[in-house]
Image (tube, rainbow, N blue to C red):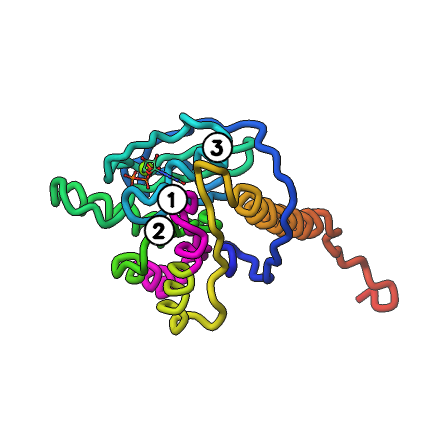
Amino acid sequence: MFPRGDFSATVWFQFFIVQISSAIFHCSAPDLETCPDESLPEFAFIGRSNVGKSSLLNMLAGEVGLARVSPRPGFTKMINIFTINKIWRLVDLPGYGFASGAKKESKRFNRAVTGYLRDRANLSLVFALVDSGLPPQEIDLEFIQWLARHTVPFVLVFTKSDKSSPAEVSANIAAFNEKIAAWFVEPPTSFTCSANTAQGRQDLLGVIEELMTAIQAEAARVEKIIAQKKNAPTRKRGPDLQRPW
Ligand SMILES: Nc1nc2c(ncn2[C@@H]2O[C@H](COP(=O)(O)OP(=O)(O)OP(=O)(O)O)[C@@H](O)[C@H]2O)c(=O)[nH]1
Ligand SMILES: [Mg+2]
């Protein structure tokens, strides 16, 4: 799994405690074109309607009411962007697979979400959410295949682990991983989470921290090269005293 950007070093996840010191709503954008500048790395949540994207964002940010949650599927309708610790962003996306509702509206969601996932240059990682209480669903499998085809960097997050027995959760995850295995050389990294119990919180924050460290190191490296080029003395040819002609 590689973050999007100019660097391609393999990132090894080390899990350590990450503190969230600030989580601030930035804006709601109806599509990619209206998203804010690409100055900060973004980590986005995607998955079927009602899978728990907004709840997971709140759980990671440590603020219950930051993103709006509802038992009604198709609730999040915009690309909602939150700035965390002033240096990175969490992005709550509208879900897919919500059958009812105006066709025109769901087409707009799909265009906005696929545009964002494909073309957002500062999208560092996608958290692709799958309900751990269900056997593999065709629509989720299709979506993971779409992510693979478009080389979108992602990890799998199996949600709502508190709702089913550990044995059921394990069986569903194993079945899902088996279904997608053929599309990947290495199986995607996956996590099991619950917004209710905060299971998986430090693991996911650890992933973000690890990527942020790599992104900042790369930015510092590029800055150093630019500064060196700027400060390099321009070679002026002096008079050749041996050959005054
Ligand atoms: N038991 C349990 N319920 C959860 C969990 N996460 C979310 N829910 C519930 O699932 C429902 C949907 O949660 P949301 O976070 O709004 O889901 P979403 O994926 O953002 O949904 P859309 O915005 O409609 O696409 C709400 O009733 C949540 O309370 C969880 O970890 N455990
Ligand atoms: Mg939502």
**Mark 3: amino acid:** Thr
- The answer to whether 157 is drawn above or below residue 145 in the figure is above
Whether pointer 2 and pointer 1 mark residues with C-beta atoms closer than 8 Å, the reply is yes
Q: Nearer the viewer, residue 163 or 53?
A: 163
Give coordinates of residue 32: x percent, y percent: 32, 43
Q: Quadrant of ligand 2?
A: top left
- Quarter of the image for the C terminus: give it: bottom right
Q: Is residue 209 magenta?
A: no
Instruction: Point out the frontmost of discs 3 and 1.
Output: 1
Which secondary structure, mark 2? loop
Please state the extent of the stretch shown in magenta in the rendering. Answer: 143-170
**Neighbourhood count class around disc 1 (C-alpha, 10 Å): few under 14, some 14–19, many 20 upward:** some
**Mark 1: amino acid:** Lys
Which secondary structure, mark 3? strand
Queried on whether the Cβ of the residue with tag 1 lies below 8 angstroms from ligand 1, the answer reads yes
Would you name the residue on which mark 3 appears? 83
Queried on whether the Cβ of the residue with tag 2 lies below 8 angstroms from ligand 1, the answer reads no
> Along the polypeptide, which appears first: circle 3 or circle 1?
3
Would you name the residue on which mark 2 appears? 133
Whether pointer 2 and pointer 3 mark residues with C-beta atoms closer than 8 Å, the reply is no
Kindly identify which numbered label has been placed on residue 10.
none
- The answer to whether 65 is drawn above or below residue 14 in the figure is above
Give coordinates of residue 94: x percent, y percent: 29, 41
Which secondary structure, mark 1? helix
> Along the polypeptide, which appears first: circle 2 or circle 1?
2
Measure how far apart labels 3 and 1 are at the Cα level: 30 Å
